Amino acid sequence: MTTDLTLHAVGKEKELVIVTGLSGAGLTTALNTLQDNGFYCIDNLPFELLYDTVALVESGQINARGFAFGMDIRDQRFASDFPKIKESLSERIKLDVIFIDADQETLLKRYSSTRRRHPLLGESGELAEAISREVGILKPVRESADGIIDTTLLSAAALTRAIEDRYSQGHFGLRTLFVTISSFGFKYGPLIQAESVQDIRFLANPYFDSNLRHLTGLNLKVQDFVMNHDLSRETFKKFEDLYRFLLPLYLKEGKHFFRIGIGCTGGQHRSVTFAERLGEAFRKTPMSKISVSVVHRDIEQ
């Protein structure tokens, strides 16, 4: 299916996305997604050139579906005054600011697996300190953002879908609630930063079937075993009904991101089955302005 990202300007009004957020959270992926879908993108735009570049956009000399500027901690001068900057720009241009976020533990893991250097990493080499400083510096920007996308539990592909979903309607102001359904195993620790967690360790466990133990909930045989019980089917129906009731209310309340954790003992069979089936149900009969993705934290354990 092709996503139409055509932006419909009103009169001579131009439309601009400012992509900002924490280093390592996925800003490059977000900008690349916009560029791949017809936006004219400028990464690491110097603060001194911001207003001149906006004037160029207003002039209509560049023909593009939309415009996106990447602004991050590499140029800190925009951060403290960002609320005023956003207000002044909004008087001239149709503006949407998205903040790409992630928790510190996730950012530490991402930097440990790459050769990239955090832009605030000082001589001490304390990465956690650099990340904490960045969070503090960008706090005014985060608080002024029109949308926050937390990539703590999102893959690059899921972030791409989230960006496309946000701009697929051809105009700004379409706020979307991004829902991540995550399976996990309690034996490997709780699911951190989940808004809602369901414990399904009371359901029949495929682990005790020698023919299924080596498989996961991605396998239809395991899913059939889990769901072939009245208790499982009733529990699943109640979960689906609960979240179909709650998620639109969280969207209305103003949330941008919601994590649902479904846990079993090892995060291999029951929780994976329920997460997959719940994601499938929400995709088959979607809720308006609610985007759903599924991840499995412990399936490789």
Image: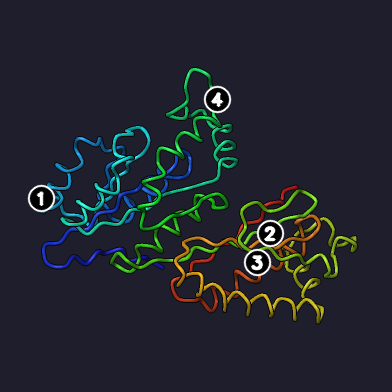
**Mark 2 or mark 1: whose residue is earlier in sequence:** 1
**Mark 2 or mark 4: whose residue is earlier in sequence:** 4
Q: Residues within 10 Å of mark 2 (few under 14, many from 20)?
A: many
Q: Quadrant of residue 105?
A: top right
Q: What residue type is labelled 3?
A: Glu
Asked which secondary structure carries label 2, the reply is strand
Residue denoted by label 4: 126
Pinpoint residue 143: horizontal percent, then vertical percent.
39, 51
Inter-mark Cα distance, 3 to 1: 47 Å
Q: Which residue appears at 59% of the width and 37% of the height?
A: 109
Residue denoted by label 2: 183
Asked which secondary structure carries label 3, the reply is helix
Inter-mark Cα distance, 2 to 4: 32 Å
Inter-mark Cα distance, 4 to 1: 45 Å
Residue denoted by label 1: 61
Are circles 4 and 3 on residues that touch, CB within 8 Å? no
Q: What residue type is labelled 2?
A: Ser
Residue denoted by label 3: 276
Mark nearer the viewer, 3 or 2: 2
Pinpoint residue 144: horizontal percent, then vertical percent.
35, 52
Inter-mark Cα distance, 2 to 1: 49 Å
Left or right side of 170 for 181? right
Are circles 3 and 2 on residues that touch, CB within 8 Å? no
Left or right side of 51 for 184? right
